[in-house]
Image: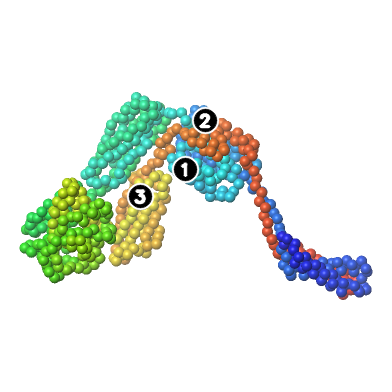
Amino acid sequence: MNETFNLYTFLAFTGCLATGLFFAWLLYWRESNLTRQLRIGLAIGRTVTMSLILWLLFSPLIQQISYTLEKPVIVIAQDNSESIGAFTPAGFDSLKYRKDVQRLQAGLSDKYEVRGYSFSDKVTDGLDFSYKGKLTNATQLIKQLSDELMNKNVGAVILATDGVFNRGGNPAQELASLKAPVYTIALGDTIPKKDILISAVNVNDLVYLDNDFRMEVQVQAYQCNGVPVKLTVLEDGKKVHEETVSVNSELFSKNIPVNLKASKTGQHKYIISLSPVEKEISVKNNIFQTLVEVIDERQKVLIAAAGPHPDLAALKQAISLNKHHEVSVVLNDDLLKIDPKGYGLIILYQLPDNQFDANTLLTKIKAEKVPVWYIIGAQSNLNRFNQVQQQVSFSGNNAIQYQYSDVDKNLSIFDLDPASRKIIENFDPLQAPSGLFKGLGNQQVVLDQRNGKMKTDRPALFFMNDNGRKTGYLIGEGLWKWKLSEARENPQTPVFNELLGKITQYLSVKDDRRKFRVRPVKNTFEENDRILLNAILYNDSYQPVNTPDVNLLIKDEKGKTYNFTFSRFESSYQLDAGILPPGNYSYTASTSLGSQHYQDKGSFFVNTLTAEFQQTLANHQLLYQLASQTNGKLYLPDQLLKIKDDLLQSNQLKTWSYEDRKYEELINFKSLFVLILVLLSIEWFVRKRNSAL
């Protein structure tokens, strides 16, 4: 029925009952073939049957109440990382500990719902005592528990670990979300043992050819006072550095700088090692491996001009400050001997000139598609200039006028801070042709021309793209005046040099125009990382396509090969090559598009994880804090069976009872249908037997 018996329900039920009585009276009041007892019995049955049938027409609701009991959930989480098996205190019986944990789990299962987990670099169901995990991440465990046990009756968390969490940090904040006491089992050894280790190596993973670079090695030592330790650095198997480290305390830590030189391009594997000491607890943390990629970014820059000019010296000096730029100034007829192929950037200073058009050089430059920076001045032959390139066209008066420079408000190619912008806008004016000029294509403007205080929309310094070749244009000569005007306030002229350096860098950097490229998401993977690679393929219009298959062959140092096929993702390709053993790997990717066959090669490195051996001392203080802040308790391994008694005596673990109320229409009850059918059948049978039909 409804939750409240209201007047409507009462009247409806009364009406159904009265109707049932009325039909029974009509049928059995004057029935002469039946005895008085049978008439009364059959009348009652007919009354009930008719009342029920009529009552169903009002679709009454029946309230059903059920109760569900939920036992408290007890979580037992076992640290399965390598350090648990490697560093144990004296007298620790690993087999006995394992059996005690299993006995604890079985004993608690009688009254509670017990769930076992193992955690290290990943979280798995069940208790695992193999101790093969490469990392310890308790935060990941607690987050998974929070997701799985949300709105559950979590009674307690039993956490068996050494308290050394080398991934994810301190899990205290995540534990608070479970709202359950944490009982910690303190594993590991807190007594310092003799050990030396490399705790960290800091070095840039990308350096430039012929540059000196520094590697900082952080060495730590425990209980090794007075013991000399030899530090060795190998580059691709060749010794490049060796020194002796004097350990002068029981708790020793020191950053040791190692100066190296990048003498060869490519990826180089560096192995940093410390010589072992007698009775050392672990030698796995004595070695550290890292990769450094050496690239050659040196660019030859040619400054070509018809004759001497102060601007040439200013350009050369500013560009030469970058030691990766080799600058040459070539004048007049010597330009005929120049081969543009060997240069990363050519600066055509007022060429074509009124007296020297450098036609031979310009023809070679156009054929080689070398990036070009045109500087237009008073000696420029503008008519000839309009012929040798098709992006900027001059017309009208060629008289010279002075133009100041403003930094364009939409500058996006490189950054200039507000102070530098102000200095540039205070530079002396340049001498520029006063005629009109227009750019035939998209322009990336750096500086705009300004007449006195009147700003214009005419660009002074801008970049364009000539069918894949970068081109730059400076409308005006007199750069040496910029340098002098800045020197009046700042003798070191950093802004002028910075601006010229950025212009040169932008124009000389080579764009990767290959149609097929394959790259791993990073050059160095840890041994528990999944090897992920991305690939992209372009058609002749440089639109990405992923119709053909892309195959990949990975080869390790021993020559073992692994074959894969990339998966298509949107308009590119992706590959998950899974987890590979530590070592150096090279790869070759290949595909075909139409009649063209493409191939790309590269390499990556899988590093051995030694994080579990970087800290050999257990952190029981942290475990005590985790337990105390959640109203739990710390136990030693030989005390863990006491956890059961403490939990049974605790008032915090209570069974939850859930009341479930639901309403269902009476017509859905099959038993009611059976009752009506039985009553009608009995009535028919009795009437038939007594000839009352």
330 left or right, relative to 415? left
Q: SS for tag 2?
A: loop
Which one is earlier in the sequence, the residue at label 3 or at label 1? 1
Three-letter amino acid code at the position of disc 3 = Lys
Res. 344 in view: no
* Residue 415 found in image quarter: bottom left
Three-letter amino acid code at the position of disc 1 = Asn
Q: Point out which mark residue 137 bears.
A: 1
Q: Residue at x 35, y 57 (%)?
A: 535
**Which is more foreground, mark 2 or mark 3?**
3
Of 188 and 530, nearer the camera is: 188
Of 450 and 683, nearer the camera is: 450
Q: Point out which mark residue 92 bears.
A: 2
* Residue 677 found in image quarter: bottom right
- Label 3 neighbourhood size at 10 Å, few (<14), some (14-19), many (20+)? few
To which residue does mark 3 refer?
522
